[in-house]
Amino acid sequence: MTTARASDRRRHDRGPDAAIEAEIRAEGMVVAGLDEVGRGAWAGPVTVGAAILDLAAVPSGLRDSKQLRPERRQVLDRSLRDSAEVATGEVAHTELDRVGLAAALRLAAARAVAALPRRPDVVLIDGSVDLLDGAGYRTRLLIGGDDRSCSIAAASIVAKVHRDAWMIDQDPAHRAYGFAANKGYPSPQHRAALAEHGPCGLHRRSWQPIRDLLAPRQLDLDGLERATAPS
């Protein structure tokens, strides 16, 4: 008897396939995959990737971007840009601070799908949250979608390569934080730099760890203003 856990493990080892896409395409519909990156970062944007694959030219070795080495992601990203229709949508850290994470992910998702060369009839989304709710698209949510759907895996790769490149570009101006290595995620070096220098202009000021760092600094400024104010 095959257990669900064993079946899931074999599917994970085998990688995603295009079975769901083929089923939808057989009905004459255009299908796209959607996935996000940057949710857990403390600095930089959230980015959503979207991909419409040519099922006759699916690059081999597609996986959830987190399972791939950076060099392999770069190769697959170039292959996808040659063989598929891909796009990214982004919400900057400043906009994210204004609207909140949930709204930022929805905005980035809508921007990604709108940037595709053609409108998909169905969008496959990784996870249990419909990032396109209310945006006018027919969606299908897939738990563990980047292990099940080639389109979602492709979207995750495109999004991660795009966001990683942006964070690397920012590194020279913010060298202490190690953005080229950590991409804005809370690595030990990143945490140490925050403790020593405080947040820089790329940090998400609405994030609790950043707010906690800013609070004592604001108290110090308030105390200084009171001490130097004319009586």
Image: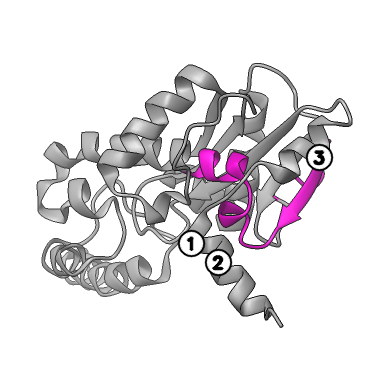
**Place of residue 226 in the rendered image (x, y in percent of width and height, measured from the top left):** 24, 70
Q: Nearer the viewer, residue 92 or 132?
A: 132
- Residue at 84%, 31% in the rendered image: 26
Residue at disc 2, secondary structure: helix
**Label 3 to label 2, Cα distance in Å?**
22 Å
Side (left or right) of 148 relative to 81: right
Q: Which residue is mark 1?
A: 13
Instruction: Please check the rendered image and state whether residue 148 is part of the magenta-colored stretch, yes or no.
Output: yes
Query: Which image quarter is the C terminus in?
Result: bottom left
Q: Amino acid at mark 2?
A: Arg
Q: Is residue 93 visible?
A: yes
Mark 2 closeness class: few <14, some 14–19, many ≥20 residues within 10 Å: few
Circle 3 is placed at which residue position?
A: 23
Percent x, y for residue 181? 19, 51
Q: Is residue 51 above or below residue 180?
A: above
- Name the quarter where the N terminus is drawn: bottom right
**Few, some or many C-alpha atoms within 10 Å of disc 3 (few <14, some 14-19, many ≥20)?**
few
First to last magenta residue range: 131-156
The residue identified by callout 2 is 10
Residue 125, horizontal then vertical, whole percent: 68, 49
Q: Which is nearer the N-term, disc 3 or disc 2?
A: 2
- Is there CB contact under 8 Å for labels 2 and 1? yes
Q: Amino acid at mark 3?
A: Glu
